[in-house]
Amino acid sequence: MSGYDVTEFGEMDTWGVAEGTGKRFANGKDGQFLGLSVNATDPGASSPFWHRHERSEEVYVFLEGQGKMALDDDVIDVQAGTVVRVAPETWRAVHSAADAGRPLKWLCMRGGGDTLNAIGHDGELDRERPFPWVA
């Protein structure tokens, strides 16, 4: 067994294209404490749902595009260079600005006070909550 995993996502221009979902995970088969996803949302599109984690903390690093991020009842502007730390129990969703001209792309890193296996899939989804940028 090796002490590392390698995941190839390709150029940022291909993110979201291969699977059609805009999200790919790079936890490796034996990831313990950190999780990582690469994400792309087309202009005018939003996260498919709100979500939060019971025990995991996340850091979003926006790399390209412009948009908004909803954090509980707050909405902030995000763009290339914005970094947002999100505490456990905080509801979050992302929206790519319709007039941005390019997809919003970001990395999301998550970790908790335990191994990822012990934490498990602690995410909670809310598919009914309306997004604040939809009139």
Image: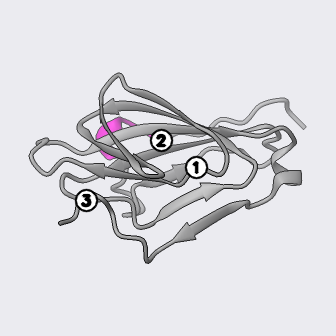
CB-based contact (under 8 Å), mark 2 and mark 1: no
Give how far apart the Cα atoms at labels 2 and 3 are: 22 Å
The single residue placed furthest to the bottom in the displayed view is: 128
Residue 53 appears in the rendering: yes
Residue at image position (51%, 52%) is 24
Q: Is residue 99 left or right of residue 95?
A: left
- Disc nearest the viewer among 1 and 3: 1
> Of the residues shown, which amino acid type is indicated by label 3?
Ala
Relative to residue 117, is residue 36 depicted above or below? above
Q: Secondary structure at mark 3?
A: loop
Task: Decide whether residue 51 is among the magenta residues.
Answer: no
| Element marked by disc 1 | loop
| Alpha-carbon span between mark 2 and mark 1 | 28 Å
Q: Is residue 126 above or below residue 66?
A: below
How many numbered tags mark residues here? 3
Highlighted range, magenta: 9-14
The residue under label 3 is: 45
